[in-house]
Image: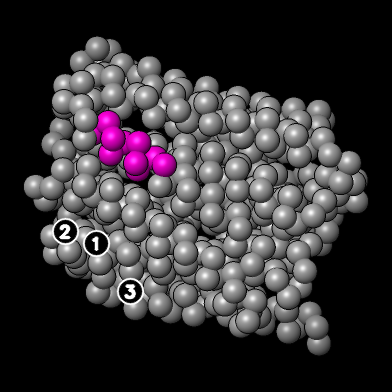
Amino acid sequence: MQPGEIAVGVVIGRASEFFDFFVYAIASVVVFPKLVFPFTDALTGTLYSFAIFAFAFIARPFGTALFMTVERHYGRGAKLTSALFLLGTSTVAIAFLPSYEDIGATVIWLLAAFRIGQGLAWGGTWDGLAPLLAIIAPEARRGWYAMLPQLGALIGLIVASALFAFFLGNLSAEDFFSWGWRYPFFVAFAINVVALFARLRMAVTPEYVELFESGDLEPQRISDTVKSEGRGILIGAFAPLATFALFHMVTVFPLSWVFLFTEERPTRFLLIEATAAFCGLLAVFASGMVADRIGRRRLLGVSAVAIAVFSGFAPQLLAGGVVGETVFMVLAFALLGVSFGQSSGVVASNFSPKFRYTASALTNDLAWLFGAGFAPLAALLLSSHFGLLASGAYLLSGAVCTLLALRFNNRLELAASS
């Protein structure tokens, strides 16, 4: 199987997953506080919504453990089918969610259950192709091929933002909160079906089966994997922390701040976000070329330093009106594209072939949990109490963790080679 063929499948899968992700994220700001938490003020309702938002990241490692067991016993096709079925079902169920006025506090429990279902499913959709792509690609172009899967995230964001902007801009408030917000969740379900067939088509190719049988894509028990690769998993989880913290600081948190603390309608900001995401796409492409010149880990380290500097001043730009918001989003997405483009499987090559597939999945789960799961909640909580600049503290902590993890990883490699 050629790296280019793997890249196409990964981009389709990533775009599907992240479209689901951003549809929920946007709804967490503009829909759920009013639909699910109308009994409190808008800020508190959004904080509650962000707390439920984090449930998926907590559930994701458990989903990995569950669906790895399914894969070991019934095969990869059964795993992907059941995981994507759960993801689609949980997503489309949110589209039928009643309001608090209809069923009271039960709606909160339903939303939490559906969000946990999404998290469990995301753990099961791991196919191991992203780190594998970076490993089997030509050595001189590993940065380029490592970048390709990350395009799917920004594609998913652009489509989700544009779709919500369309409904918000063309429907009355009554129609939007009655039925308009539900349509993006139906679209997410349809995209999941397309992604399922694309992934299954790849999973049955002889080359894919050969990779599975050779051990490069073979699942292992979680306990055995942690025992063998625990140190590498921990380092890998913290290595991209700055990138994943920035990911939510630029995609979810700004929308909540603008929606809650300015007079601006979310429609225009969503269009700003979608436009800035195109700049992020260009930056992702650039990251592949730069990484092949200076090395992936060095680029990730330089990006972490840049993110630390960015955290010290940039959040204030969100208080600068449309111009400030635009400058913040373009700068943030450019920085995100460079760092996020090389964040996938940065330490996967350190794992032994036998455990690489499962260890990479766990590393990915923990990186998103520690770096991104609580980022919108922490940023909004800090900024609402201490001002916008305080939201950069969370981002700064992620940058520090990344630099420490990369330094520790380098020491381990030097010790192993000596």
Circle 3: residue type: Phe
Circle 2: residue type: Val
Labels 2 and 3: the sequence-earlier one:
3
Q: As drawn, which residue projects farthest toward the left?
A: 263
Expressed as whole percent of the image width and height from the top left, the position of residue 102 reads 24, 12
Residue lying at 37% horizontally and 24% vertically, measured from the top left: 183
Q: Nearer the viewer, residue 205 or 312?
A: 205
Circle 1: residue type: Thr
Determine which residue is flagged by label 1. Answer: 326
Determine which residue is flagged by label 2. Answer: 322
**Position above or below: 237 against 55:** below
Give the label on residue 112, or none. Answer: none
CA neighbours of label 3 inside 10 A, class few (<14), some (14 to 19), many (20+): some
CA neighbours of label 2 inside 10 A, class few (<14), some (14 to 19), many (20+): some
Determine which residue is flagged by label 3. Answer: 310
Labels 3 and 1: the sequence-earlier one:
3
Expressed as whole percent of the image width and height from the top left, the position of residue 122 reads 57, 39
Residue lying at 41% horizontally and 57% vertically, measured from the top left: 278
Expressed as whole percent of the image width and height from the top left, the position of residue 12 reads 60, 43
CA gap between label 1 and label 2 equals: 6 Å
Relative to residue 119, is residue 98 drawn left or right? left
Q: Main secondary structure of the magenta part?
A: helix
Q: Nearer the viewer, residue 385 or 288?
A: 288
Q: Does residue 280 appear in this view?
A: yes
Q: How many marks?
A: 3
Residues at circles 1 and 2 in contact by the CB criterion of under 8 Å: yes
**Position above or below: 77 against 293:** above
Q: How is the image coloured?
A: one colour
Where residue 115 sits, quadrant-wise, is: top left
Span of residues in magenta: 159-168
